[in-house]
Amino acid sequence: MNENINPNVHTETHTGHGGLHTDHHGHDHDGHHHHKQSFVSKYIFSQDHKTIAKQFLITGMLWAIVGGLFSVLFRLQLAYPDETFPILETFFGRWAKGGQIQPEFYYALITMHGTVLVFFVLTGGLSGTFANLLIPLQVGARDMASPFMNMLSYWFFFLASVVMFSSLFVQTGPAAGGWTSYPPLSALHEASIGSKAGMDMWIISMALFVVSSLLGGLNYIATILNMRTKGMSMTRMPLTMWAILFTAILGVLSFPVLLSGFILLLFDRNGGTSFYLSDIVVNGKILPNEGGSAILYQHLFWFLGHPEVYIIILPAMGLVSEVMSVNARKPIFGYMAMVGSLLAITILAFLVWAHHMFVSGLNPFLGSVFVLLTLLIAIPSAIKVFNWITTIWRGNIRFTPGMMFSIGFVSLFISGGLTGIWLGNSTLDIHLHDTYFVVAHFHIVMGVSAFFGMFAGVYHWFPKMFGRYLNNTLAYIHFWVTLAGAYLIFWPMHYQGLAGVPRRYLDFRLWSSFNHFTDLNKMITIVSIIVFATQLMFVFNFFYSIFKGRKVRSTNPWGSTTLEWTTPINPGHGNWPGEIPEVHRWAYDYAKDGRDFIPQTEPLNPGESKH
Amino acid sequence: MSTTWIFIALILGFVIIFQIAKASEYVSILKGEEKTRKENNRINAFLLLAFLIAGLFGVWYCNHRLSGKILGEAASNHGERIDNMLWITLAITGVVFLLTQIALFWFSFKYQEKEGRKAFYYPHNNKLELIWTVIPAITLTVLVGFGLYYWFQITGEAPKDAMEVEVTGKQFNWEFRYPGKDGTFGKRIYKEVNEAKSNPLGQIWDDAANHDDIYTTGEMHIVVNKPVKLIIGAKDVIHDVGLAHFRMKMDAVPGIPTTMWFTPKFTTRQMRDKYGPDFNYEISCDQMCGKGHFSMRGTIVVETQSEYNAWMATKQPQYLAAMEAMKGGAEKGAVPGNVKPVEAGAGAADSSATAGKPVAALTKH
């Protein structure tokens, strides 16, 4: 590996410094170092931020297929608990004995579905892709502050993926204690088959993931703060940059806490410590552990776990703000308020974690503090929604696929955000905690919404990534089926939650209180299969269009003001063949002074007002 | 076989859609890309409006179909408060939902790209932004106010006359203990747990308060209109006592006892008269606890005081069963005849000051 990258280290460092507008000479004929690149250093151990972005995106997409497939499998069980599917036994053997999903298998599926989608797709896949692709292009830099560290960030992510994927194949199966992996369930080998080897691999994989996330995050922060091109003051940056900056800060400050929680868990599992364990009799066996607290883990977990949902949603918000403004042909409304609300969300994100623990026996007074802080988050969120709506008001809207997904994002964010006001209120949480209401809430507000933000980003920046367009017809089908499907799947779940139907049950036939949703469960499963198939169609469109899509003929196909569209259609490593352009205005001069748009690189005209 | 057909149908459907999509791209090139783009714009703008209307209808229809399937009237005093809070929250968030969704989709439709339309350069308006910061702030203050008012009522101290029941969760069922005639729970320690010796809760038999404690599993009995305080714990992993009809819920954590209290309003019989003969107050485990999580079911029988007394009279203290088991064990010689476990004695002496407070003090040395 070293042989392959060493020749580049020098060049990359050189380009990196080139970004600091001190040394522009070396880049007048930028192609000069490209012919040296072997296949491996160009496509595999690449230090080009654009290639790394594609690696994150494609890895994330593969994970999304795996995670999505898991959800289809457990939805089959929920809809048809008494039917047999022999094909499942063919593929999964004893885990689906007699064609029926076994409880252990069901719990492994939901655990891996959550882990994969939250961390590997919506954190790694989303942040990793768009932070890497957009930061240097939009702030005007040749590459990241440390391209080598950036490459490491991807390969740690890859390693984490390999470990997590391997855990699916160990004899006792992968982790099965839910994506939150609460001890003692996750700490005791005897408590569940999913708490054996699979759990250790889960922890190791997550630790590697945290390393990847930190390496990436530090790089994002350093690049945004230090490597902006001349004239790119912080308040001239597109909102994508602000969103990614705050996301990275959240990650850097909260992931280490998660890691510490996991390490203690690893000790409790294998080292005989009692951080989380006390007074336990499991399977008739009396354990010696005393004095630990199972609740401690929940504090450590949710201290990341809650910021995590903002780590997922903030980049989506940034992407949507940008795509929306471009396609409404209007400046984003209330730029400073958008930045301020991102900041407010970032700060509050650290102060609300215990709202996941209202019924854990938490002191009610402490609970009340967390109610107040939690509901405060609704204020910046509301500001953002109102500002997005005002952005499209009196616009001249082009419904590109990216724009459609942005509108869908706002709709879903409203629907899912409002139920957050229900769950954040401890009084209601007593009844709704751990029911389908929670499932509906977080799938809409951070699952599907974040996916919509990601899709908006992929459709909008695909031309920049590959120099081609995605197929529009497939894109519109993708959008409409996914939006309608998301509402059909998750809207009725609120009612199941109000009926008290608990999460993580694979069969309701035992229960007289929860067994009357059979038809609904079937409907939801059928819709989710259709939606899943539509995502496969998107994946097909993606890979097909990389090679066969309609070619991009203009450097600025969307008529956008930002810097990434001043690069060539297929930019090489270093992004701009000549000097990095200088910036003279903010990123949102659309419809100003009778002009459709004014690129950031255009100097202010005499007498022209600033925004 | 049918799965094969489904796969074949899916693949065929996909091929057809893909061919149409590819053809439409060629058509758009023939027609002129700009013209196709504008056509797509009009179609999607119309669809957004149609989606709004269909969506609002869907919201109504979903409610129409499912509102009868959610739980009936709250069956506890706290449940009433929670339902009040639910209505207040629904009213406020419902209005916001309608206004913002309608604005979003209507503006999208109305301001679709049109020949000759110029977008309006409108980067900010401080007054407007102030308004929509202040209004949510006030609304949320109201919601926090109501929420905390109810929250402190629900989580406050249980009334002095509340009956107490100890609930213990284990993989995968529920165990209950009643304090017996003396009204006091005897001490217990997890290290004494021994199913073979008929001591599933680890009661310490040296403590006389234990001698009349009643142990049951699966079904809990409580008295209508009498406050009940549950003292909740777990043996192995975290469970959760979920009582949907009473709208109550509390985690059962090994090593850290929790409590909750409420006053049931209707007997099981009254509820059966209302909701049919199959009705049962069910205890669901609401915290993932392993492979049997979905089947960790208990029931609660709410009855009148006299019915409760009659039921209680049929129960024997666990002490007798344990003594029986010990005798049997001693006779067979299978269990060393250690009637006074050393550790238990030590534990009891340690925490004699906290007699009557079960679980908590005893488990920490």
Image: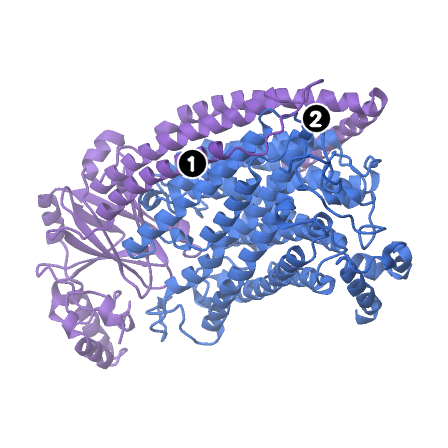
For the C terminus of chain A, the quadrant is top right
**Residue B290, horizontal then vertical, whole percent:** 43, 57
Q: Nearer the viewer, residue B317 or B111?
A: B111
Image point (55%, 34%), residue name: B124
Disc 1: which residue: A494
In the figure, residue A151 lies in which quadrant?
A: bottom right
Q: Which chain has been coloured blue in this picture?
A: A
**Residue A579, horizontal then vertical, whole percent:** 82, 52
**Left or right side of A61 for A249:** left
Indicate whether B126 appears above or below B198: above
Image point (35%, 47%), residue name: A372
- The three-letter amino acid code for the residue at tag 2 is Gly
Q: Which SS class for mark 2?
A: helix
Point out the residue furthest to the front here.
A607
Indicate whether A69 appears above or below A363: above
Indicate whether A500 appears above or below A354: above
Mark 1: give few (<14), some (14-19) or many (20+) Cα within 10 Å: many
**Residue A195, horizontal then vertical, whole percent:** 49, 63
Disc 2: which residue: A594
Residue A173 in sight from this viewpoint: no
| Measured Cα–Cα span from mark 2 to mark 1 | 47 Å
Q: Which chain has been coloured purple in this picture?
A: B
